[in-house]
Amino acid sequence: MQGPRGLPGPRGKEGPPGPKSGGATYTRWGNSTCADIAGTEEVYSGITAGSSYQHKGNGANHLCLVKDPQYALQYSTSGRRYKSYIYGSEYEFPISGTHDHNVPCCLPCDHQVNSTHDTWQDIMSS
């Protein structure tokens, strides 16, 4: 048998703030960091990748891949006929010594923004 419940104790110290959630994320192509965008938090920075112009199939969109991926499983292509390759993108013009250099990318997250059309136009024009 249990006795009556006691009075509540004093309130404890406030804990540290939790992680932010929600907001808008988008890709900044050609930028190695997103730290210069006021009010945003960098999710990650990486390298732009996509399909080869010489191969049929593959996706049409570019991807922003992390620089140091961690693979959960080993993948074997033996016995498989259907596969696609992904390649890192490179600059192909001689401006400021960027020819054949990787194309950087980063993903910022703005926790103050939702995905309304006007807000996106403001972000993209800055």
Image: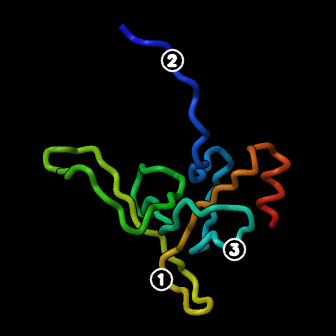
- The CA distance from mark 2 to mark 3 is 54 Å
Residue type of the residue flagged with mark 3: Asp
Q: Which residue is mark 1?
A: 100
Of residues 19 and 123, the one drawn nearer to the viewer in this rendering? 19
Residue 89's label in the rendered image is: none
Q: Which residue is mark 3?
A: 36
- Residue 73 in the image, given as x and y percentages of width and height: 22, 49
Dot 3 lies on which element?
A: loop
On-image quarter of the N terminus: top left
Dot 1 lies on which element?
A: loop
Mark 1–mark 3 CB contact (< 8 Å): no
* Quarter location, residue 95: bottom right
On-image quarter of the C terminus: bottom right
Of residues 25 and 103, the one drawn nearer to the viewer in this rendering? 25
Q: Which of pointers 1 and 2 lies earlier in the amino acid sequence?
A: 2
Q: Residue furthest top?
A: 1
* Quarter location, residue 42: bottom right
- Residue 97 in the image, given as x and y percentages of width and height: 55, 92
Give the left or right position of residue 63, taking residue 87 as reference. right
* Residue 93 versus residue 15 in the image, above or below: below
Residues packed near mark 2 inside 10 Å, few (<14), some (14 to 19) or many (20 plus): few
Residue lying at 49% horizontally and 13% vertically, measured from the top left? 4
